Amino acid sequence: MIRKEKIEYRQFAILVLLYTVGTSVIIAPSMLASYAGQDGWISALLGLGIGLLVVWCYASIGKFFMGRSLIEAINESFGNYLGFVIALIFTFFSLTLSSLVLSNIGNFVNTRMLVGTPLDAAEYIFVIVVIIGVRLGIETLARSTETLTPLFTFLFIVFIFAVLPQMHPNNIRPILEHDIHDIFKSSYGFISFPFGELVLFLMLTPFVSKNKKITKGYVLGAFIGGVIVMIITVLSILSLGGYGTAINTYPAFTIAKKIDVGGVIQRVEVIMAGIWTFSIFTKLSVCVYVTALSIKQLFRLRDLNCLTIPIAISLIPLSQWGTPNAADFQTYTAMWMMYFTYIIMIIPFLTTGVLYLKKKWGKKQESKA
Amino acid sequence: MSKRKLLLVVFLSMVLLLSGCWSRRELNEIALVIGLGVDKIDNEYVISTQIVDPSEIASKGGGGGRAPVVTYKTKSNTLMGAIRQLTASTPRKLYLAHLRMLVLGESIVREGVAPALDVISRDHELRSDFFIIMTKGNKAQDVLTMVTPLEKVPSAYMFNMLRHSEKYWAPFSTLKIDQLDNEISGDGKEPVITAVEIRGSLKEGEQKKNVENISIKNYLQYTSVGVLRQDKLVGYLNETEASGYKYLIGKIKSTVIEMPCNKDHKDVTELIHTNSIIKANMRNHKPSIDVQINSEANVAELECQSNLLNLNVIHALEKKTEKEIKNQITMVLQKTQKEYQSDIFGFGDQIHQTYPKDWSKLKKNWNKTFSTLSVKVNVKVKIRNFGKVNKSTPSMK
């Protein structure tokens, strides 16, 4: 028997954290400011609150599954046929998400850093590293992110202090100029992305060594990650203004580009981009791992590693096919992905409901007999 | 480690390192553009690019006697087109990341500068740390062909000149692309751009001989500030008015103020700290602005006889300085409100920030409202020090 992989709740929390920061750190500020302008941070706060509630529900559901992954739970509650369909939809979601994350980092690198490099080349480099990571297993992945965390934290703190001189407090005024409808409109997106997408971690909860600690790891990771994204949003609004944040494709990179400490420390944006390279690597690895795991459990395969390379390589054409251009990504793709996420977010709740009813019903049958 | 694994590691690290070289350009293959000028002549953009000749800059004790920079001119309907067209006349590909000065010709600012700015905020190669100036009377291409003393690279000359002038002399200020973008697209503050002029003759200034004499006859100078409405030039502020503008927005770092003490002499104070607080008020949906300016000053120069140990003298100096500052502010307010109708002070932003609801109605007609806006200015100056001596140098009279 193969030894089952285990991760500590702390490693789980770090995975959740980096996953939450993931791609949202480069896109979320612009998304939040798109409707709410300089009130984007209020949307972020709202989204964070509701998002944490969602994550807390996920965590409780994960605990309720008692060592089963989401797909195993779906199979058990909906039976072989309906369960298969629902699990297939979930797997498809996971694959779509992976391809979007990849196209995100690909486009980012391609528009802001390596402009002459073909998109394929930039994406292949990322994908190769992810394949290596995923093949080594979730335990290794968790540990490696744990070792990256100090560097991540250090860079993030340096980033905050380095951009402080460009802040203009007046940019955030007038507070609450936009009506509540616009503010909510901006936060819908923030609830689904990144918090709704954390549904993928329900596939990983069985690996957490202590079932009790799932809630703590899940919520803590999402909370810190959400706060980091919010801080970046506030920094972008303060330095670029509401309008500037909304029109910039990657506001966080734009403010990193403006870093100039005493004329000595400047042009360091690529180092700062290391922050999101880590987090996006983690997010993509988790996505690919979960996709592979889902397919494995869906088709009852014995080995996971035989799936990683085909999945990862297929992501490259998928990502370019799914988001043919940058405008498409910001409008159309972002929209349907949000709805898709909301639909997927319902699945764990449904599964839990059915499981619960089955349990109750089963008990009644037992007592009758 | 097995041989296969080692090979894999080598291969992967090669992929990682080489991918960065995809579109590499070595220093000897690129042309560092340090100044960029944009003119509009006969409905066509004329782009002038000042390119550094690195071998001339680096060489100690005389290079080949060539000019340290070269300025190319190209005509095209679009900016990007003109920049790319330059490859047909330069041996190297232009590299824009080290741009120091963007010089906008008066013609293009008069016509509307926004279309020209798009490529500058869109292109990935350009950073946002260069300064933007405009020309007054001349063309941008002429400004970029002047030979300058002290600095071999004329764009660096203008860059440093503007930076220091902002620090120690009131009227002029630096402007970066993101600020200009924000001011053009926003509706609460209109942009101003520092304007440069050629003093002397262009014909002589273009030649290397210009810097061979001790007295420089043909040179570049910042003389005024262009006032824009949206992205179009509406007029200029002279030095005094431009100083008034800087006092009002509280961006003065340090400057000097002259005031007459008798018929032919003047006293001078040096401002060391200045800040301004702009407050918007709304009474019966009618906006008004209160400005409080606080300043600290030193005594810098006394031409009249006075004893500084006498407190009344200090008080009188404070009052006079206040009056002078207020005077300059009134002048600039008068000109921008009545003549240009352009809210360069950001009063609109202030109203927007304090009264967002009223602003949504006001902003449509803001330029009209601005021209009749009542602005109350209060100036407070405190004199701290009077330098090394406490009396003015005695005159023989």
Image (tube, coloured by chain):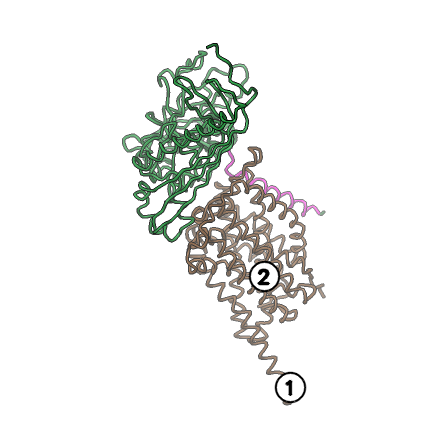
Chain colours: A brown, B green
Letter of the chain that mark 1 sits on in the rendering? A
The quarter in which the N terminus of chain A is drawn is: bottom right
The quarter in which the C terminus of chain A is drawn is: bottom right
Rendering coords of residue A196 (x, y %) = 53, 62
Above/below status of B345 relative to A279: above
Residue shown at 51%/43% (left/top)? A167
Residue shown at 49%/31% (left/top)? B253
Above/below status of A244 relative to B158: below
Main secondary structure along the magenta-highlighted residues: helix
Judged from the image, the secondary structure of the residue bearing numbered disc 1 is helix
Image quarter of residue B262? top left
- Residues at discs 2 and 1 in contact (Cβ within 8 Å): no
Q: Nearer the viewer, residue B175 or B151?
A: B175
Q: Which residue is mark 2?
A: A290
Judged from the image, the secondary structure of the residue bearing numbered disc 2 is helix
Above/below status of B273 relative to B351: above
Q: Nearer the viewer, residue B240 or B224?
A: B240
